[in-house]
Image (spheres, rainbow, N blue to C red):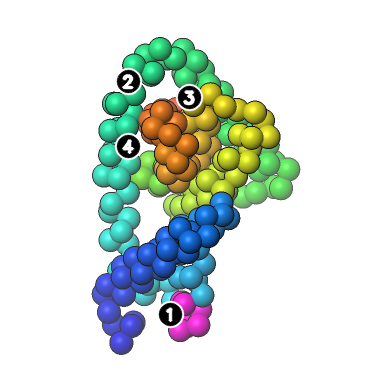
Amino acid sequence: MLNGSLFFGFFLSLFCYWVAAKIAKRFPYTILNPLLLSAVFIIIILSVLHIDYDTYNEGAQYLSYLLTPATICLAVPMYRQIQVLKKHFIAIFFSMLAGCLACALVILGLSFVFHLDTQIYHALQPKSITTAIAIGVAEEAGANSTITVAAVILTGLIGAIGAKTFCRILKITHPVAVGLACGNAAHAIGTSKALEFGEVEGAMSSLAIVTAGIMTVILVPIFA
């Protein structure tokens, strides 16, 4: 019955996320991120019921269509903080450029150290930008977009979980710096975390997603 249901994956994803959100609200620990918990729940359910990923994804893929409009909606908090953007434009530009270059260099260096296949290297290059852009970049580079999606999600989860800790350890307190760091390193998932810090942080993180996406699209062919 489950294998024959077209929307099984769709409703399973929503249900698992709803449960995960309830748990995260009841126990507000960083590690209990709703996206991470829902992913774990889905993996367990699919494994126990012996349902393959393709069957699940037949319905779950419809949620992916919402990625692009959800990313575009991040322009709203950015528009509200347009004066902050104008005031810190130079600092924002160079910090974003430094972040994108650091990401590209680290991936290149680790690929050499671990002797990664060229296709895997290309798949990892866009790991720090939002999924909607990363998939297109990976496909243009001839990489497996499935690996890219996994890398993007893992990067976002680690960024969201460790954002507060890293900012506290490195004593990063300026709202613009916090927002840019979250958006540049952990894209949309990091932005959801940045919004918990404040509206300025969320707006700057939204800006970082767009800017990092554009810069990465330019840098990937160069590093490739």
Q: Is residue 136 visible?
A: no
Q: Which residues are magenta?
A: 45-51
Label 3: element kind: helix
Q: Residues within 10 Å of mark 1 (few under 14, many from 20)?
A: some
Q: Amino acid at mark 2?
A: Ile
CB under 8 Å between discs 3 and 1: no
Q: Is residue 113 magenta?
A: no
Instruction: Using the image as rendered, state which of residue 65 and residue 217 is in the foreground.
Output: 65
Label 2: element kind: helix
Q: Amino acid at mark 1?
A: Ile
Q: At x 48% / y 24%, what residue is drawn?
A: 176
User: To which residue does mark 1 refer?
Assistant: 51
The x and y percentages for residue 190 are: 48, 42
Q: Is residue 41 visible?
A: yes
Number of marks in picture: 4
Instruction: Using the image as rendered, state which of residue 115 and residue 31 is in the foreground.
Output: 31
Upstream in the sequence, badge 3 or badge 1?
Answer: 1
User: To which residue does mark 3 refer?
Assistant: 176
Instruction: Using the image as rendered, state which of residue 191 and residue 209 is in the foreground.
Output: 191
